[in-house]
Image: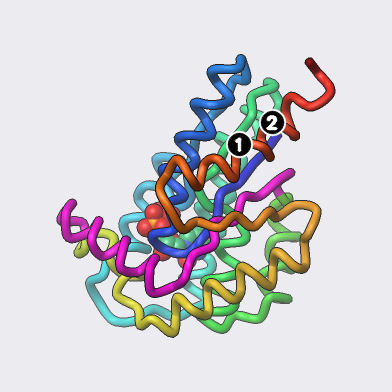
């Protein structure tokens, strides 16, 4: 299975994806945990360019093409080989992030994004966990984390955006969840990590273990 985790900044994706991996691994499901941007050597270089907060605002299309280049490398080098060998792939962000950020928030038409995805043979994941949180709370969490880790200059480009940008990203994700109701599962990301994971666990158990016991 190919499962992606999505959400606004500070929604707790990275923590939850780690908890999901442990939950599955403890029950004998071999998982590969990966991320976008930056799931390959090439992707890590792209990530540094994309997420640095230095320099003038970027053209939305050049940003889009970099995310898609990262995705192609990630799919061919990491995701598809793992899936072919029977490993479950958990990815911290994937194509819905492009639809939400470059599409809704940066203004690239969704049709352009999805036409490029078709040309590049970018498949939809099997399932997506969307961690949904008030934009203001997510931004506050992300800023506190960057201040603690001193990563603002390296990874602060999106965190530095106005609240309205994050509101737009959140709305876009919720629209995608309505458009793909079978695939995208909206999880309330408010509360402690354990509380949030208790909302995700039943889904994992349904997808992996239902009918097996
Ligand atoms: P991520 O590493 O998930 O950051 P965080 O853990 O702080 O949420 O993602 C980095 C940033 O890249 C995030 O601001 C969203 C952005 N992004 C896009 O704009 N488009 C994309 O296609 C992807 C994958 C990420």
Which residue does the numbered mark 1 point to in the structure image? 201
Whole-percent x, y for residue 162 in the image: 35, 83
Picture quarter with the N terminus: top right
**Residue nearest the observer in this picture, 172 or 60:** 172
2 over 5 or under it: above or below: above
Instruction: Specify whether residue 50 is in view.
Output: yes
What is the spatial separation of the Cα atoms under label 1 and label 2, in whole angstroms?
Answer: 6 Å
Q: Position of residue 177 (x, y in %)?
A: 70, 64
Residue 83 belongs to magenta span: no
Kind of element beneath mark 2: helix
SS at badge 1: helix
Residue 145 falls within the magenta-colored stretch: yes
Residue neighbourhood size for the residue with mark 2, other residues' Cα within 10 Å, grouped as few (<14), some (14–19), many (≥20):
few
Query: Is mark 1 in CB contact (under 8 Å) with mark 2?
Result: yes
Give the image quadrant in which the ligand numbered 1 is located. Answer: bottom left
At a point 45% along the width and 35% down the height, the residue shown is 18
**Residue in view at x 64 percent, y 29 percent:** 88
Where is residue 158, by image quadrant? bottom left
Q: Splitting the image into 4 quarters, where does residue 82 fall?
A: top right
Q: Position of residue 165 (x, y in %)?
A: 44, 80
Q: In screen coordinates, is 195 left or right of 139?
A: right
Q: Residue at x 25, y 56 (%)?
A: 145
In the picture, the quarter occupied by the C terminus is: top right
Left or right: 171, with 115 as reference point = left
Crowd tier of the residue under label 1, counting other residues whose Cα lies within 10 Å: few below 14, some 14–19, many 20 or above: some
**Residue highlighted by disc 2:** 205
Query: With respect to residue 164, does 75 lie above or below?
Result: above
Give the extent of the magenta segment.
125-151
């Amino acid at each position: 299975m190919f499962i992606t985790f999505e959400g606004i900044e500070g929604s707790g994706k990275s923590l939850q994806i780690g908890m999901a991996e442990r939950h599955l691994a403890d029950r004998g499901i071999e998982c590969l945990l990966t991320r976008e941007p930056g799931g390959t050597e090439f992707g890590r270089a792209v990530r540094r360019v994309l997420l640095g907060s230095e320099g003038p605002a970027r053209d939305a299309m050049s940003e889009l093409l970099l995310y898609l280049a990262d995705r192609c490398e990630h799919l061919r080098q990491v995701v598809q080989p793992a899936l072919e060998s029977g490993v479950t792939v958990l990815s911290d962000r994937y194509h819905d992030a492009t639809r939400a950020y470059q599409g809704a928030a940066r203004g690239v038409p969704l049709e352009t994004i999805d036409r490029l995805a078709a040309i590049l043979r970018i498949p939809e994941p099997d399932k997506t966990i969307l961690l949904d949180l008030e934009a203001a709370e997510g931004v506050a969490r992300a800023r506190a984390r960057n201040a603690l880790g001193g990563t603002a200059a390296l990874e602060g480009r999106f965190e530095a955006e106005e609240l309205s940008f994050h509101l737009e990203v959140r709305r876009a994700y919720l629209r995608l969840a309505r458009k793909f109701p079978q695939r995208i599962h909206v999880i309330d990301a408010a509360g402690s990590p354990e509380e949030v994971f208790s909302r995700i666990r039943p889904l994992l158990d349904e997808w992996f273990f239902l009918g097996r016991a």
